[in-house]
Image: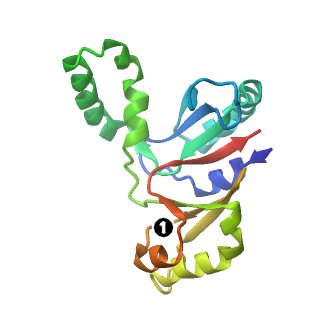
Amino acid sequence: MIDNFEKILNIMSFDDENDFYFIQLIKRKKDNPDMKGDSVVIKDWYVSSKEYLLSKKDSMIEMANNYNARLTIRINKRNYKKLGLKMISDITQKLESENYKGLKSSFSSVAGQYSSDKDKKWIVDIDQEDLKNLNEIKNVINRSLPNVDKIICEIPSKSGLHLIVRPFDLREFNKLFSVEIKKDNPTNLYIR
């Protein structure tokens, strides 16, 4: 079991009344080999405060355990006001293509695609075999901008680690490592 609630709570910030973090409960084939598809979203949450997240924590974990699913969070916050305009475009596109059933998932779809965080965060997805290079990876990331610590926190995963980092110059990093950098993907909040 991996519970990253405390680590995530420490990096959350709410600067505007319209800010929120996007959390999804996702059932994956990786954890459920009998599934037909790769993954299915069970439930979405739109978290506008740390207090709200804490109030939902137990029920989120219970659902994750019941479905053998993972709780994931987009670490770059979203903004209801800014997503509203993107949603209009998404709905228009679905109406034009006569994808009426797709309308029900419009907000979640847009929330998953568009971040409005001024303090962008990336995920450096380090697999088990690359953990031996963790210190070197961190040094290269921090060297990209001297005197600025780029590492925000470490989020354990089932098969390695997610480094949550501030954006950095990728040139040297990409020459040295074949580690994936995710610029607006979810990380693990809870894994059973």
| Residue 105 placement (x, y as % from top left) | 41, 23
Q: Is residue 161 visible?
A: yes
Kind of element beneath mark 1: loop
Splitting the image into 4 quarters, where does residue 160 fall? bottom right
User: Which residue is located at x 66 percent, y 68 percent?
Assistant: 130
For residue 144, side relative to residue 62 (left or right): left
Q: The N terminus appears in which quarter of the rendering?
A: top right
User: Which residue is located at x 52 percent, y 78 percent?
Assistant: 176
Q: How is the image coloured?
A: rainbow
Three-letter amino acid code of the residue under disc 1 = Arg
Q: What residue is disc 1 on? A: 166
In the rendered image, the vertical position of residue 112 relative to residue 6, given as above or below: above
Splitting the image into 4 quarters, where does residue 99 fall? top left
For residue 14, side relative to residue 103 (left or right): right
For residue 138, side relative to residue 64 (left or right): left
| Residue 17 placement (x, y as % from top left) | 43, 41
Nearest the viewer among 128 and 9 is 128
User: Which residue is located at x 59 percent, y 76 percent?
Assistant: 137
User: Which residue is located at x 57 percent, y 31 percent?
Assistant: 39
In the rendered image, the vertical position of residue 131 relative to residue 54, given as above or below: below
